[in-house]
Image (spheres, rainbow, N blue to C red):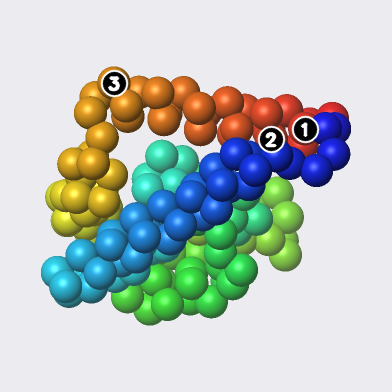
Amino acid sequence: MRGKPDDITIRAWARLMAAQHLALSAVERALKAAGLPPLAWYDVLLELERAGGAGMRPFALERAMLLAQYSVSRLIDRMERAGLVERRDYARDGRGQLVAITDRGKAMRRGMWPVYAGAIEQAVGRHLSAQQAGALDELLGRLVAGHRAEEVE
């Protein structure tokens, strides 16, 4: 560990946090304006669709999600009431549950993607060249990989 971060590192951190906040806010506004659910719903639907028909345990879903979600249980409750996901008993553990995406949930995710993609382009893509986006992707990939490696240790 290096100790106290230098001024450039502190500024990079602050800009990373500001950029994340601004981009996520823009995406949320676009989804809301289109009459669609919040981004966390898309995140859940995408992870469940990737998991296939078997679904996922709620703790695994929370771990896989792109967005921090402190109340996955309540989120799943709301999505279940909307008919987008369903809970199933986990055969290996009578107390556990699996969460799976429904056909309605798949349709919702597909319907959300064009709005989400457009918001990503507006929030990030239009401000960066392809080369700049590639450099940002590489740098952020290094940060993610470094943190994941530390989690394993």
Are there few (<14), some (14-19), or many (20+) residues within 10 Å of tag 1? few
Residue at the location (62% across, 28% down)?
Answer: 145
Q: Is residue 74 visible?
A: yes
Q: Nearer the viewer, residue 67 or 82?
A: 67
- In this figure, which residue is indicated by the disc labeled 2? 147
- In this figure, which residue is indicated by the disc labeled 3? 131
Residue 56 lies left or right of residue 40; in this view the side is right
Between disc 2 and disc 3, the foreground one is 3
Residue 105 lies left or right of residue 34; in this view the side is right
Amino acid at pointer 3: Gln
Amino acid at pointer 2: His
Q: Earlier in the sequence, mark 2 or mark 3?
A: 3
Q: Nearer the viewer, residue 25 or 19?
A: 19
Report which quarter residue 39 is drawn in: bottom left
Are there few (<14), some (14-19), or many (20+) residues within 10 Å of tag 2? few
- In this figure, which residue is indicated by the disc labeled 1? 150
- Image coordinates of residue 38 in percent, x first then y, are 34, 68
Q: Are marks 1 and 2 in contact (CB under 8 Å)?
A: yes
